[in-house]
Amino acid sequence: MNALLFSLTLVLFGPSSLVVHSAPPANSFLSVHDQGDRQGEAVGIEYESKIYSALLHHASESHRLLERSLTAGVATASAVEIGADGSTGNTNTIELKKLTRVAKPLYDISDKEEASGTEEDSDLFDEILEIYPDDCQLLEDQTLKDNLSAIKDEDERFKTYDNIRAHAYLKARLDPDKWYEYTHLEMTAAFNCKQIMLGHRPIYRSESWTKIRELYHQFSQDYDEDELFQFNTDDVNPQFPTEPFQSTTKGRSLRAARDIRKGELIYKPTNNTIVFVDGGAWRDFIFKLYERNGSPYDKETACDFMVWSWVNTLEDGRLAIFTDLSNENLLNSGADKEGWDPPNLQCGKDEEACVQELYAIKDVKKGDELLVDYLSFAQPDWWNKIGL
């Protein structure tokens, strides 16, 4: 099998230098499929937390792209120090004695010849355990097994599992007493959001939204308006021409409650639109949702609002996190590219700047799903810019 595995390790050495450890090509223990060592042991490298999180994110989300950029490594890694002025210099050489667990999500498990087994559940999970023999405990979760079995595309199934186990490994490294320092990625891991969102999630009823709004108003009393606020207190619970529904392919979704004409306003920020200018205040709110009912804690609601939150700029240029305390959160993304349903809404009218207002760009029939391109109003890579 021509599987490629690589190790890319970033370690932060203060504000003036960055040390990059990268493994050059050669025959190596890192090609674990060829060497037969699928388990490995974690090496004693302490990652600076944010650099580690970034590495883990790319390992779980973008490993196919990275595999095309890097090749298999050797048992030693050369260290190059890059100074603040752009100068470089060699530092010590580190011997990588065993494969690190953080690199394990980077396996190329899509080789068709080796992964051409049956769709039977026992064979599926035997194959996973052959690749990851330490994962018996993770696979004891019957709900996870059922949800993975429901994914028919083999590549997508393994990609999803790799993503989940990468977050499980990150969660094991987290210090629960330092929750107030968690990044967005670390919160996703702490709440098991990847597993939760893989399963069925219900549509919130009106009484559920009432309780969440009451919780927010109580929570907000401890914060100033320069930290969080309601976007528009004049529009109180307006009625939009939308209704939530469960899609057979996408789960929770939003559709037209009546015929909609091109150019019609479909959504605008209201009193239910909450703006967090301070990333720490948003983190506090998510944990408040998590702890609101006591033990057992409410991971599901916390994960819902992590998915339903996005980063963008206010009209005055400040970065902020937006979320809605309503079912308008269920609007799914569309895109004008292969494999996606095209959007029928856009952010902003005609050539106007987008200020979170959504307009129909075509006539929409009652019952049709409503879609907007998330990237027209959300910046998914900006969480670190707001302290998360």
Image (cartoon, helix red, strand yellow):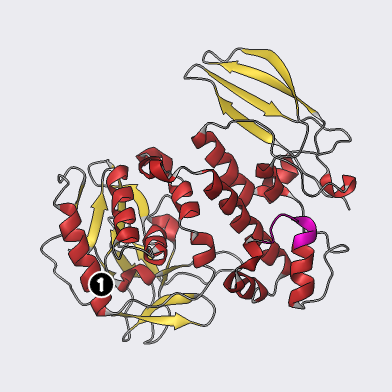
Residue 239 falls in image quadrant: bottom left
- Magenta region's main secondary structure? loop
In the rendered view, tell whether residue 92 sits above or below residue 306.
above
Residue situated furthest front in the rendering:
295
Answer left or right for 113 relative to 148: right
Answer left or right for 102 relative to 216: right
- Total marks shown come to 1
x and y, in percent, of residue 166 in the image: 61, 51
**Residue occupying the point 42% across, 49% down:** 379
Stretch in magenta: 129-136
**Residue occupying the point 44% across, 62% down:** 373
Other residues around mark 1 within 10 Å, as few (<14) / some (14–19) / many (≥20): some
Q: Per the image, is 39 magenta? A: no
In the rendered view, tell whether residue 282 sits above or below residue 198.
above
x and y, in percent, of residue 11 in the image: 58, 27
Q: Front-most of 181 and 308?
A: 181
Q: Per the image, is 132 magenta? A: yes
On the image, numbered disc 1 is attached to which residue?
209
**Residue occupying the point 67% across, 65% down:** 156
Q: Can residue 95 be seen in the rendering of this structure? A: yes
Specify the amino acid type for callout 1: Trp
Residue situated furthest left in the rendering:
234
Q: Front-most of 345 and 205?
A: 205
In the rendered view, tell whether residue 344 sits above or below residue 193.
below
